[in-house]
Amino acid sequence: MRDLAKSIRRAALRPGFSLGCIAAAAAASAASFFLPRAELLGSPWLLLPLLMAAGALAYSVSLQGRALAAWAGRRPAEAARLPGEGPAIEAMGRRGYTLASAAGDRGGRVLFFERNGLGRLGSAAFHGGLVVAVCSGLWSLAFEQRGFVQLFEGETFTGQAREFASVKLGAWAGEFRAPMRLTLERFADRYWDDREVKSYESILTVMEDGRQYERTVSVNHPVRVAGCAVYQSSHFGYAASLLLERSGRRRSRQVTTFLLDQPPRAGGRAAAFNELPESPYWVRLRLSPDRRALEATVLAGGRIVYQGPLEQGPVRIGGDRLSWIALRRWSGLIVTRRTAAAGAYLAFALCAAGGSAMLLFPWRRLALAAGPDGWRVAAASRAERALAAEEAGEIERELRAAAASPEKETHGPLVVV
Amino acid sequence: MDLLWSYRLETAFHWAGVACYAAAAVGYAIEVFFSKEAAGRWGLRLGALGLAPHGAALAARWLASGHGPYMARAEVLSSNAWIAAALFLAVAWRTPRLRGAGIVVMPASLLALGVSVFLDPRARALPPSLRSVWLVFHVLFAKLAAGGLLVALGAAALYLLKERRPASGFASRLPALDILDAYSQRFAGFGFVFWTVMIAAGAIWADQSWGRYWSWDPIETWSLVTWLSLGAYLHLRRFHGWRGARAAAMLSFCFALSLGTLLAVPLLVKTLHGEYFQ
C-alpha cells in the first residue's frame, strides 16, 4: 500500500498529470453534446475527470500551502544586513523589493529580495477556490434534492414527494419531502408597453411549524422556508377546465383540466392539445387571455366534430355536451434543498480574490550576489522569465551606476568580493 | 429624451467612433508595413479619441433602454468593441512597446463596431431573469476576459511578425521575442482569471434565478471548454516550457474558442442563455 501511495504521488507530481486532468475534463464537457444530460451527470465521463481534477487541485493547493508555510516562517532579514549593503537594499526598495533573507559572509554574499508576497497567497486562494467549486459540484451530485411543482391558484402543495411534477435527486439523496405547505393565493404577471414580459411572481401562503405567513416569490428573489429554497420558475400559464357530459349507455360527467403555457408576449394566444379521458375525443384549445376567449377544435376518430368558441356556453358534440367551466392561473415553483450554494459563493470569493491578487501583485523573487564588479543578479523567478530577466538587467545597471557614482563614495563602497 | 432623438444621437456617436477606430487601424497598419513610428502614435491618439463618442453612444443607449448594453446583438458587439479598445489603449499607454498590438486589436474593434451599426438597433426590454447584479458582474468580466485575450493575441501576432521579418524597421523597434512572448502569456493569464470570475458569477446568478448553478447549457459547456483550454495553455507554458510559435498557435485556438462561445454558439443554438445574441 505504501509503494502504491508513493507511485501515485510520483505520478501526481508529474506536470503531465495536471494536463491529463484538464484534457479529461475538456473531453467530458465536449461529450455532453453527445450524451443526454440526465445520463451525463451520473456517468463516468463526468465523475472520473471531476474526481481527478479535484485530486490534482487539492494536491496543488497542499504543495502551495507547504511552500507558503515555509515562506511565512523565514528568518527576519534585519539581522542579516552587513555594512555597505544599504545602497543596494535601498535601490531594490525603490523597485518595491524587500530584503527577505541573506546568506554567506563577505566572501560569497547573496541577498534574497522579493516583491508582492500577496501574489503567492493569491495563487493558493485561486486554486483553493477551484477545489471548493469542484467539491460543491460533487456534493450537489450526491445530495441535491430538487423538485418542480405546478400549483393552481387556490391550490396547496403539502410537501409530499408525489406532488412534485418532476424530481431530480442526487445519488444518495433519498426521497424529497418538503417540510412545509405552500398555497398559491395569486399569480401576477406584468408586461411592458411592447407586450414583452416585465415581471411575474407568485403570492404564497406558507405554513411551517404551525405558523402561517405570506411570502412573494419572483425571479431572482427566492424564498427560504424550512431549509428549502423556493424559486419562481419561468413556466407558468393558464388552466382551462372542461366538463364533458356523456349521454346514452356511457352516461358520465367528467372534468378535465388543460394546462396552457403562457404566451411569450401579452396579447398572444396560449394553446394546448390533449385527449378527454374515457372518451373518443381529442381537443385542441386556443386561449386568448386578454379577451377571455376560448376556441376549441374537437376531434373524434380523426374527424373534426366541433370547431368554434366555448365561452358562449355548452356545445353539443354528437350526443354529448362540452362546456368550459373554469379558467385559473398556474405557476411553476422549483423547490430545492442541499444545493451546496454556500460552496459556490465561497469558490467565487476565493477565485475572484486570489485571481486579482495574482494579477495585481505578481510575486517575484531575485537573488543579488556580490561579485568583483559589484552586485549581480544571480537568480530570478521562473514565472515570466523573460520579463524578470529584463528587470534583472536593469537592476544590475542601476546598481553598477550607483556603485560608480562619486556621491556614493562618501557613504562607503558597496561590499565587493 | 425622445426615443427618436436618442437613436439619432446614438447613431451619430457610433459613426464617429467607427471613423476614429478606422483611422487608428490605418495608422497602425502604416506603422507595421511602412515602419512609420509617427503613424503608430497617431493611431494611439485616434483610438483614444474614438473611445469618447463610442462610450457616449453606449451611454445614450443605456439611458434610453434602462439597462446595460447586453441584450441585443448590436449593443453586445458594440460594448465588446469598446471594452477591447479601452483595455488595449490603457495597456499601450502604460507599456508603449506593446503599441504595435493595435494592428490586431483596433481592426477587431472596428469590425465589431461596424457590424453592430448595421444590425437591428431596437432595444429589448430586460426579462425578469436578467435583472440581477450578478448579471452585471458576469457580463463585465466576460467582456474584460475577451478583451484581455484579444490583447494577448495581439502580442502573439507581434511575436510572429518579428520572428518572420526580423529585419524590418517595425520589427526592430519591437521588444525582444521572449519579451513579447511573456506579455502574450501575461494577458492570457489576465483573460483566464477574468473568464473564471465570469463563470463563477454566472453560476451564482443562475442559482439565484433557477436554483441550479450549472445546467450544461451549450454556452455554459463551451465556456467551460474554453476555460479548460486556457488552463491547459498556461500549464503548458509554465511546466512544459511551451514558447514561441507553438504557444502562439495554441493561444489563437483558445481565442477562437472564446469567440465561438460568446458569439457563434448563441447564433447556432437557441437557448435561454443565448437570448442576448438572438
Image (spheres, coloured by chain):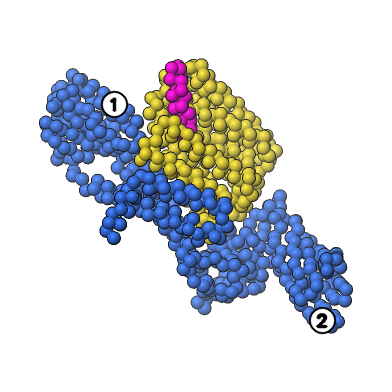
Chain colours: A blue, B yellow
Q: Residue at x 46, y 50 (%)?
A: A25
Q: Is residue A242 left or right of residue A370?
A: right
Q: Position of residue B214 (x, y in %)?
A: 52, 55
Crowding around mark 2 (Cα neighbors within 10 Å: few <14, some 14 to 19, many 20+) is few
Residue position for label 2: A250
Residue A259 is one of the magenta-drawn residues: no
Residue B236 horizontal/vertical position (percent):
40, 40
User: Image point 27% across, 27% down: which residue?
Assistant: A395
Residue located at (45% from left, 42% from top): B230
Q: Chain of mark 1?
A: A
10 Å crowding of disc 1: few (<14), some (14-19), many (20+): few
Q: Nearer the viewer, mark 2 or mark 1?
A: 2
Q: Which residues are magenta?
A: B152-170
Mark 1: amino acid: Gly
Label ID, residue A393: 1
The spot of residue A248 in percent (x, y) is 86, 82
Residue A367 visible to an observer of this rendering: yes
Q: Amino acid at mark 2?
A: Arg
Q: Are marks 2 and 1 on the same chain?
A: yes
- Give residue A103's quadrant in the image: top left
Indicate which disc, 2 or 1, sits on the residue closer to the N terminus: 2
